[in-house]
Amino acid sequence: MSYWTIRRRDVLTGYMFVLPQVAGVALFVLLPVGMAIWYSLNDWNVFTGQQTFVGAENYAALAADPQLPKVLLATTLFSGGVVVLNIALGLLIAVLLNRKFRGVTLFRTLFFSPVVVSVVAWTLVWGFLLQDNGGINGLLSTVGIDGPNWLQHGDTAMISVIFTQVVRSVGVNMVLFLAALQGVPGELYEAARIDGASSRSVFGRITLPLISPTILLTVIVTIVGALQSFAQIAVLTAGGPELSTTVLVYYVFQQAFKFNDIGYGSTLALMLLSFVMVLTLLQWQLRRKWVFYEE
Amino acid sequence: MTPVRKLVALLATLALTACGAPATETANKAADANLRMTVWTSNEGQLKLLNSIADAYRAEHPKVSSITFESLPFADYNTTLTTQIAGGNAPDLAWMGDISRDLIAADALVGLTDPLKATEGWKYDDLVDSAAAEYSKDGTLYAYPFSNSPFALYVNTDLLAKAGQKIDPAKLTWDQVAAAGAAVQAKTGKAGFVVRDFDYKAWNTLATVWTGWGASAWSADGKTCTFASPEMQQAMTFLHDAAFKTKAMPGPGVTADFFAGDAAFTVAQVSRASLLTGSFKFGLHPLPAGPKGKYAVIGQAGVGVLASSKQRDQAVDFLAYLSNPENAAKLAQFFPPPRKSLLTGAQLAANNKVLNAAQLQAAVVDQLPNAVTLPNHTSPAEIAQKGKTALDALWTPDADIPAVLKSVCTAIQPILAK
């Protein structure tokens, strides 16, 4: 009897199918994470290549870093603002565009088009528009409003980076919500109307539960995306004024590549990774409480 | 012959050919040098000149099979260079600005004094001391300061005339610049004076102003922050007033490009004269006097050899060639040289299409001997970022200037004391 039985061949085929993915994850995720853990335990002089094992010193430095609380606050404000606005606006636009009227395709294209624009080009243009003597304030002045110096004050700078990020990326969530809305069976709405349900209760009791799996997906993807937002910050504010828009991922870049403190930068990167993992797991666990699966 | 035998015969022939390659050719290949030098310019003329010097060197040194000039974007130059070094892919030679102190402190550069002195005809004594100081430690030069560009005051005389303003360059003070700038802003809507590249971020460029008040960012030994000194308070009060009271300087978030005709004055390096397009009449003068009198500030760039280079001797030899009197004279058409023999207005003007001999004599030659450099220290990026974060609070109309300056010292003192 040959060694290569049908079962063994099937098993080998299965492994061959997953091998590229496993190899990719191992090479581009697990290995870098492992290296980051090793770097976080070392002090690395990049100019001489000398590495000194320092144990938990970089982790202790997290607690002693006077800038870190401000960075975490900026990260929370930015990510929270982006997630709430992105989901709410994406859903609102999807609901408005989930009906048949003249020009609906044009509107859908318009809302989605920023997604395909290069993030750096998009942010550079907004950088010009948000200058004190830029286009936004020029527009406001035509209706008698003296606009603020958007990028030079902490609060307006944060609003600006959130706004530019949301406008650029809301199209993705809109498309996902549109697809979900179009998957809601029409007979359910019909039955609800026959029962005399109001539009509000139709939305709350039929639409929302049925698109809740998509909401879960968009929330997870948007949170992860917000926590990874780098180019917008780097181009628009470079983390300023003061530390008001220095989000964690930008802080990691500063420490590791600007200040050449690879050890501390790696420690911060691992902290960011743990945040993303905890938030994702939390939502995954909580999904049973609010996500409705038809099956 | 069977196919198998044919294959064996072919492999045997290939093996014999490989083993039998001339020994001299193999040895030559091992000795061939491929030098790489990182630069931040992508200017065609500058690269052409560098390549022509490299070609001439290679003609005299056949063992050097290639010399490559790798242009890196200026904004990310230090980060890219550092990443190359950290990744074990360091260039053999590199241009360097404020990263030089870190490289010197880490012994990452090859000492140049002895090899340059030993190079026939190099004329080490021809170097201007003030130009060499920034790249020296304990009497050893670690980078050849190929560019020594003083900061100067550019004046848009058309805009001044439009606003009815006149200045006397010989007796010009910062107060007069601010007054004329405020008048231009009020009468034409254009900006008064702009410290180029500052943009309320690169605060080190403000040394071109605060030096006139006798202020400095830190003590001469680099150990103590002096940002909160009375001199710095006065200088920063002058700038704050210009930004928020007299409007002589555009405020934060307002862009004004002197070279596009948007401002009456700008402080910029003499080498920026290439940006002048001839769309307005201009003047170029030494920096205005501050309360402490006349002063000069230069921005420098050096070129050094990385100690990690596997071809360091060859790299040093090429650097000596690149910077010898003959090639230094060629480089002078783009970069104010550090050699006394080349520093005359007439010589600099010979290759300069925008500035005349008198302007170059006054703005470059006369300034270099006593010029100070922009603030430079180890960990420049960290000092710049932490200083900026603290200094951001200054750029609001009701800022508490002494408190903000004190907070700058709180932020950067731990880095200075390292």
Image (spheres, coloured by chain):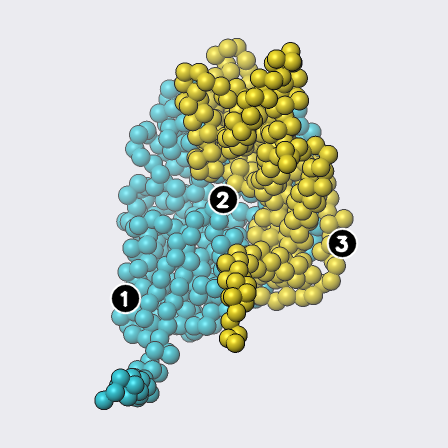
Left or right of residue B394: residue B156: left
Disc on res. B69: none
Disc on res. A60: 3
State whether residue A201 is above or below residue A40. above
Q: Amino acid at mark 1?
A: Ala
- Which chain is painted in yellow? A
Q: Residues within 10 Å of mark 3 (few under 14, many from 20)?
A: few
Q: Amino acid at mark 2?
A: Ala
Q: Position of residue A170 (x, y in %)?
A: 53, 30
B358 and B276: which one is in front?
B276
Residue A215 seen anywhere in this rendered image of the structure: yes
Query: Disc 1 and disc 3: Cα gap in Å?
Result: 56 Å
Q: Do dots 2 and 1 share one subunit?
A: yes
User: Which tag is nearer the camera, tag 1 or tag 3?
Assistant: 3
Q: Colour of chain B?
A: cyan
B378 and A199: which one is in front?
A199
Chain assignment, label 1? B
Residue B85 seen anywhere in this rendered image of the structure: no
